[in-house]
Amino acid sequence: MANNTNTGNFDSFHKQKHKDEMVKQLITFALMIVFTLIAFVVVLTGVDKIFAIPLLLLLAVVQVAFQFYYFMHMKDAGHEMPSLMIYGGIGAAIVTILALTLIIWW
Amino acid sequence: MSHDHSLNPETMPHNPEKATLEGKNKFLGLWFFLGGETVLFASLFGTYLALKNSTAGGPSSEELFGLELVFIMTMLLLTSSLTSVYAMYHMKNNDFKKMQLWLGITGLLGLAFLSLEIYEFYHYIHEYGFTFRSSAFGSAFYTLVGFHGGHVLFGLCWLTAIMVRNAKRGLNLYNAPKFNTFSLYWHFIDVVWVFIFTVVYLMGKVG
């Protein structure tokens, strides 16, 4: 018991909380499927690439945000350090991609 | 409470994966690792974007890619992300058997994804003669997509190891963080795939 100080009764309240959370996850999943379908439809219908590429990237960013905030729980409390690390990574990632592509396009 | 801190519904902490210091450290450590992985994949994406038109007379991305296979692969990996969410849901409800079941389904979906990727590479090599050495485009493509496939393979080995190793132990405060850490890693694999199917396949088809 000494090593388990965080003990609480595992009551119906928490079970219900987990259920509510799972409903949100399912909605997230449904939205991600919809975004994926939109992305494929955009390509199959041959939308002009000036519109298609920004739209595809936007859809990808939204999907990834859902993945981070809902599936990986970044929306929950106590995720300050994970946010710092992942946004730090994303910051360096953007600079890396800009540098590598600009070398070619210059 | 038993010596191995096995959980039962009466003594279940609300977040078993973060109830111990080791669990908290694993959680932070994995996110730190994912931050680094983001940069690693960014360098591969940047390289791919820079080299994707250097086909050296070989097939271009428009000729090569078929969207049907990529669509099925995307659905498989996206669904496996949801099934690992289900596994963590059952972990928090302290239902070890259901957690193992959903982790198993996650693994099977991952395996199906990996098989299709191997088939895809095989198809490119045999039908188009498009290999790692064909062109700068080929090298960049196989490095980026193959590195992601390697992550899937590593994830499958990891999953198998923790599922087999803990099969008879049941859920406890020692292994709950391990399952949670794996599930975060698996979601990240899906994050990378979202960008691969967007940047490599869909944008490759648009031109």
Image: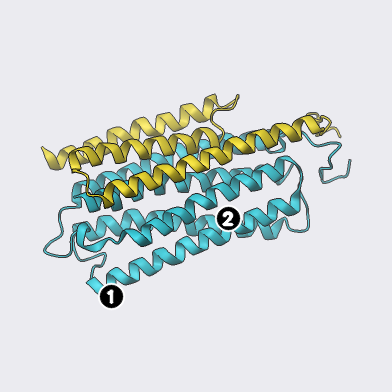
- Which residue, given by chain and number where applicable, does mark 1 sit on? B126
Whether A90 is drawn above or below B147: the answer is above
Kind of residue at disc 2: Thr
User: Which label is found at residue B160?
Assistant: none
Q: Nearer the viewer, residue B68 or B86?
A: B68
The amino acid type of the residue labelled 1 equals His
Q: Is residue B178 visible?
A: no
Chain A is shown in which shade?
Answer: yellow
Residue A1 appears at what percent x and percent y?
Answer: 86, 34
Q: Position of residue B6 (x, y in %)?
A: 82, 45
Disc 1 is placed on an element classified as helix
Rendered residue at 23%/68% (across/down): B130
Viewer-closest of B153 and A15: A15
The local secondary structure at tag 2 comes to helix
Residue lying at the far bottom of the rendered structure = B126
Crowding near the residue tagged with mark 2, few <14, some 14–19, many ≥20 C-alpha atoms within 10 Å: many
Whole-percent x, y for residue B10 in the image? 86, 37
Q: Chain of mark 2?
A: B
Provide the residue designation for mark 2: B106
Please state the horizontal and vertical placement of residue A90, each as a whole percent of the image.
38, 33
Give the residue at the far right of this rendering.
Answer: B1
Q: Residue at x 35, y 56 (%)?
A: B145
The reply to whether callout 2 and callout 1 are in contact (CB within 8 Å) is no
Examine the rendered structure and indicate whether residue A22 appears above or below residue B49.
above
Q: Colour of chain B?
A: cyan
Q: Is residue A50 left or right of residue A76?
A: left
- Between the C-alphas of marks 2 and 1, the distance is 30 Å
Q: Looking at the picture, does residue B138 appear above or below residue B95?
A: below
